[in-house]
Image: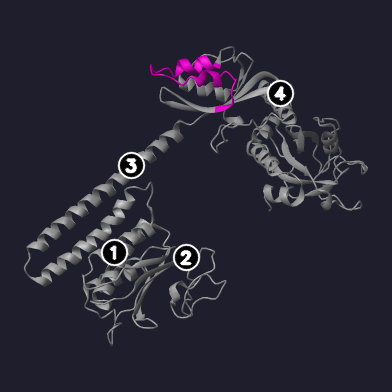
């Protein structure tokens, strides 16, 4: 289904500023639908180039029928947005977004557009056996009318309205007038959040002085939880709320202004362990402020959960910080012990242990600064590469570099990958590039995420490189599709692999660690092979969709 932006740009002459206004309106018009107990359908005029032939059949929903008006300013209409009420039955169970209708097929819309006023004339329609009352509201921005809202009320469940329903309908009428006058949505108001109060959560209607003229049962209950047992009707909402939340500390001065209905804003108040979210919408009709609608919602449980999550995140970050400190202490102790040893083999073994502990400490240091268990591995890879270069022998004149991006990885992948990368870099520096000049490059690329793969660094991965349009390295025949994968290549132009080299039978502790981490823990694949032009390529292929080790 096309988006609102697509429909406006493809079929109308509205500007980007007009489009922003419509987005703001649509983001907040659930309020109008719920207060009206009605479906809303937003129509904008077609540009002249999109005019329909005179005998074209209407493809819209039900509406006023009439003779084609050849003097109309627009050739037709396109529906760009639709909203159904949560407070009543829908009049349009089908989706109408993207439907096009020529001028004259919906008479009320044409009249509202030409006369720039709300049109409520006409008898109920029975297009699908359901009585529907149609109204049209022009959408105005400044002096310009951008389109028309069709408001359709399903009358099949009509009954004698209660005080609540009458208040809803009166508030809906005031909001519709504000839309027709270009006063809603309110410019400069903070964006309406997903968790903003809705009509059913609790509604209060204020008069010009900020006193409550009506409070829904849910609104009354919310204030009782804050500690106000009396009826809100007749009380000044701003003063009542300020008194309830008075803790002896300085309070936001704007609170009483907002809750008196003079300013549009969302606020949260807390009292007696309860937290309530309030949203004020001033009602300005004909240039005069006639009162306000205040929506309220008890968000106590949500905020307590948010606070628990923040506490949990802080605790996890502190744990990672302490683990990093402990690992650094272990590395320092191993380094001191290595300096005291007179046996070269023992000193080298301890130095290797220091590097391995250090690579794990880097991951935990990064985790201590992130709010979740996801890590930008590029920074870790650069630090591991730098660490490998720093501890290489003076005779090795090599500066490793990174090409491509690892992206964001979960912690359970980042930790073993960092350690494996440390081992492979050290192995290349000690054996492939020992006491010589050369190049050492780490190439990273991700697959299975919708992008067309490119061959990195002139190397190939798992045989034939995928053609354009494929989404990753080719799997062996009979295997399952690759899915999302991270392929890392450590390439050097050193002396190359020894004859009869086999990583599975190698007695090198470092290579055994790498194989255990990549194949056993991450369920990936590891391949050592000669590099074209001399040297060695080590290919590490790690799945990202499933981090459990393979059976």
> Which SS class for mark 3?
helix
Residue 156 visible = no
* Residue under pointer 2: 484
Residue 248 shown in magenta? yes
Residue 437 visible = yes
Among the two numbered marks 2 and 4 on one chain, the one whose residue lies closer to the N terminus: 4
* Residue under pointer 3: 314
Q: Which mark is residue 170?
A: 4
Q: Residues within 10 Å of mark 1 (few under 14, many from 20)?
A: many
Tell me the CA gap for discs 4 and 3.
48 Å
Tell me the CA gap for discs 1 and 4.
67 Å
* Residue under pointer 1: 419
Q: Which residues are magenta?
A: 237-265
Residue 115 left/right relative to 30: right
Q: Residues within 10 Å of mark 2 (few under 14, many from 20)?
A: some
Among the two numbered marks 2 and 3 on one chain, the one whose residue lies closer to the N terminus: 3
Tell me: residue 439, above or below residue 126.
Answer: below
Q: Position of residue 532 (x, y in %)?
A: 40, 83
């Amino acid at each position: 289904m096309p988006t609102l932006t697509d429909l406006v740009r493809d079929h109308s002459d509205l500007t980007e500023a007009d489009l922003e206004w419509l987005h703001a309106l649509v983001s907040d018009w659930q309020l109008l639908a719920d207060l009206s107990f009605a479906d809303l359908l937003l129509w904008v005029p077609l540009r002249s180039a999109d005019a329909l032939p005179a005998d074209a059949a209407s493809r819209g929903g039900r509406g006023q029928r009439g003779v084609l008006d050849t003097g109309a300013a627009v050739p037709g209409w396109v529906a760009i947005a639709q909203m159904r009420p949560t407070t009543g039955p829908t009049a349009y169970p089908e989706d109408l977004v993207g439907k096009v209708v020529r001028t004259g097929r919906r008479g009320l819309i044409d009249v509202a557009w030409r006369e720039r006023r709300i049109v409520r004339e006409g008898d109920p329609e029975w297009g699908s056996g359901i009585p529907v009352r149609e109204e049209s509201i022009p959408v105005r921005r400044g002096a310009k009318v951008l389109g028309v809202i069709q408001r359709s009320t399903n009358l099949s469940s009509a009954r004698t309205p209660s005080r609540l329903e009458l208040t809803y309908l009166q508030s809906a009428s005031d909001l519709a007038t504000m839309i027709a006058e270009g006063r809603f949505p309110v410019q400069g108001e903070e964006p309406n959040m997903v968790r903003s109060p809705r009509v059913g959560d609790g509604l209060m209607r204020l008069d010009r002085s900020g006193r409550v003229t009506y409070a829904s049962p849910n609104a009354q209950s919310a204030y009782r939880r804050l500690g106000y047992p009396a009826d809100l009707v007749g009380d000044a909402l701003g003063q009542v709320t300020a008194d309830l939340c008075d803790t002896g500390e300085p309070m936001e001065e704007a609170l009483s202004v907002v809750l008196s209905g003079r300013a549009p804003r969302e606020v949260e108040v807390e009292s007696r362990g309860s937290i309530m979210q309030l949203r004020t919408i001033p009602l300005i009709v004909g240039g005069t402020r006639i009162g306000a609608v205040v929506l309220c919602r008890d968000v106590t449980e949500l905020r307590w959960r948010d606070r628990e999550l923040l506490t949990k995140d802080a605790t996890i970050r502190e744990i990672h910080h302490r683990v990093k400190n402990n690992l650094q202490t272990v590395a320092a102790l191993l380094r001191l012990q290595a300096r005291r040893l007179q046996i070269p083999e023992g000193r080298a073994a301890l130095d290797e242990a220091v590097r391995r502990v250090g690579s794990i400490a880097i991951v935990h240091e990064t985790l201590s600064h992130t709010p979740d268990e996801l890590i930008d591995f590029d920074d870790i890879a650069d630090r591991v590469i730098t660490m490998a270069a720093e501890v290489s022998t003076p005779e090795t004149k090599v500066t490793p570099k990174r090409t491509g991006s690892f992206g964001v990885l979960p912690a359970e992948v980042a930790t073993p990958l960092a350690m494996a990368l440390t081992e492979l870099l050290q192995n290349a520096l000690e054996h492939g590039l020992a006491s010589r000049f050369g190049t050492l490059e780490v190439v990273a690329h991700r697959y299975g995420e919708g992008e067309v793969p490119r061959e990195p660094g002139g190397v190939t991965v798992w045989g034939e490189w995928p053609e354009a349009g494929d989404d990753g390295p080719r799997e062996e025949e009979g295997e399952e599709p690759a899915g999302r994968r991270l392929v890392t290549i450590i390439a050097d132009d050193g002396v190359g692999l020894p004859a009869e080299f086999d990583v599975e039978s190698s007695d090198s502790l470092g290579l055994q660690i790498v194989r255990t981490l990549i194949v056993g823990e991450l369920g990936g694949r590891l391949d050592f092979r000669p590099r074209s032009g001399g040297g060695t390529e080590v290919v590490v292929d790690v799945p990202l969709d499933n981090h459990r080790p393979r059976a």
